[in-house]
Image: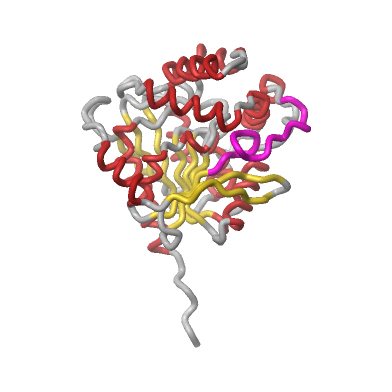
């Protein structure tokens, strides 16, 4: 494991050049929403950039739709020479909602009861999506629960993963990555929204609690994002089933030693939802993993850090591409 922190303090970086981000969004090719049939369900997905470029799959976290990956961030990653695909996990957004399954019971799952489905099933979804997109393998970037799914994808379907980036995530060990108590309590007891307006206010309150204390809180951007998620498909029951799957997942610490692809771990040092110890444990568990931590970053994607995220991911992708076997030579 190599370990580095970016910057001397939370506010020592200039904001991302918004004109650059907007220009990238204007210039990259964006394919509209498409639907893939995989693993007995359908997944909605959207791609940015040239299909001939190096492919990256973005895996989002608990109860969060693919629009949790900001359009401008996806465009910046595509402008760096990647074909970027984001998708809605099962039970959120425009993908299949498994309403025929029992309700998720997160506390019971934490205590050992079986969840309606497993994170391994969600990793299987991702593995089959990679094939449906026409790729044998992709570089995989997972955030929060998406990082857990990406780790399992890399372990159980190694032929599908060229490199792994685990962001704001953990190993599944209950000894690391602890949430702050007030946030853990809120996750278990929070009521469902009864209207679009209430959903926006609850969402903003949640982001204020879990976001980055060292960076500006962009209320208008987050308000638009929460409203967009409501319009695409608000489903607290689906989020509950995902939460149960997350809490029922076993500790992966020992298994992670089997990962051989180039691995990057990114984590905020002020993350109140998955403490930075979760990222450090992930990097320790994976041979050769590179850890980068950010002062002042919480459990979100601060706009000022987008250039650093893109650069670190691109470095890991390039490392993996450099050692990939080339096409077979003619006899």
The residue shown at (49%, 25%) is 226
- Tally of marks: 0
Colour logic: secondary structure
Q: Is residue 99 magenta?
A: yes
17 and 196: which is toward the camera: 196
Quadrant of the rendered image containing residue 53: bottom left
Where's residue 306, x and y in %? 33, 38
The residue shown at (52%, 38%) is 66
Whether residue 155 can be seen here: no
Quadrant of the rendered image containing residue 326: bottom left
The image shows residue 127, relative to residue 168, as above or below, that is: below
Answer with left or right where residue 271 lies relative to residue 175: left
48 and 288: which is toward the camera: 48
Numbered range of the magenta stretch: 87-103
Where's residue 31, x and y in %? 48, 51
Name the quadrant of the N terminus.
Answer: top left
Whether residue 226 can be seen here: yes
Q: Residue furthest bottom?
A: 331
The residue shown at (30%, 24%) is 215
Where's residue 50, x and y in %? 41, 58
The image shows residue 24, relative to residue 51, as above or below, that is: above
Where's residue 222, x and y in %? 42, 25
The residue shown at (61%, 53%) is 157
The image shows residue 286, relative to residue 52, as above or below, that is: above
110 and 68: which is toward the camera: 68
294 and 289: which is toward the camera: 294
Question: Magenta span: helix, strand or loop, mainly?
Answer: loop
């Amino acid at each position: 494991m190599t370990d580095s922190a970016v910057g001397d303090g939370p506010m020592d970086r200039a904001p991302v050049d918004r004109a650059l981000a907007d220009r990238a969004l204007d210039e990259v090719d964006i394919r509209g929403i498409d639907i893939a049939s995989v693993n007995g369900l359908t997944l909605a997905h959207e791609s940015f950039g040239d299909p001939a470029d190096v492919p990256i799959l973005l895996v989002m976290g608990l109860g969060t739709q693919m629009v949790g990956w900001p359009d401008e961030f996806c465009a910046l990653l595509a402008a760096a020479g990647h074909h970027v695909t984001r998708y809605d996990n099962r039970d959120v957004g425009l993908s299949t909602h498994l309403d025929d399954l029992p309700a998720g019971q997160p506390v019971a799952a934490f205590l050992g009861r079986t969840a309606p489905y497993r994170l391994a099933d969600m990793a299987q979804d991702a593995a089959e999506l990679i094939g449906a997109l026409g790729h044998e393998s992709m570089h995989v970037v997972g955030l929060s629960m998406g990082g857990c799914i990406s780790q399992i994808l890399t372990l159980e379907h190694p032929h599908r993963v060229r490199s792994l980036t685990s962001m704001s995530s953990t190993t599944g060990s209950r000894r690391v990555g602890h949430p702050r108590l007030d946030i853990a309590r809120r996750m278990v007891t929070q009521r469902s929204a009864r209207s679009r307006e209430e959903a926006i206010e609850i969402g903003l309150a949640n982001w204020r609690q879990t976001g980055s204390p060292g960076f500006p809180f962009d209320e208008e951007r987050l308000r638009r994002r929460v409203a967009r998620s409501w319009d695409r498909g608000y489903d607290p029951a689906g989020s509950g089933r995902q939460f149960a799957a997350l809490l029922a997942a076993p500790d992966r610490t020992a298994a992670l030693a089997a990962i051989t692809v180039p691995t990057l771990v990114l984590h905020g040092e002020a993350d109140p939802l998955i403490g930075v110890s979760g990222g450090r444990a992930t990097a320790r568990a994976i041979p050769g993993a590179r850890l980068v931590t950010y002062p002042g970053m919480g459990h979100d994607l601060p706009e000022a850090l987008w250039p650093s995220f893109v650069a670190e991911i691109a470095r890991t992708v390039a490392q993996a591409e450099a050692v990939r076997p080339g096409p077979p030579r003619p006899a």
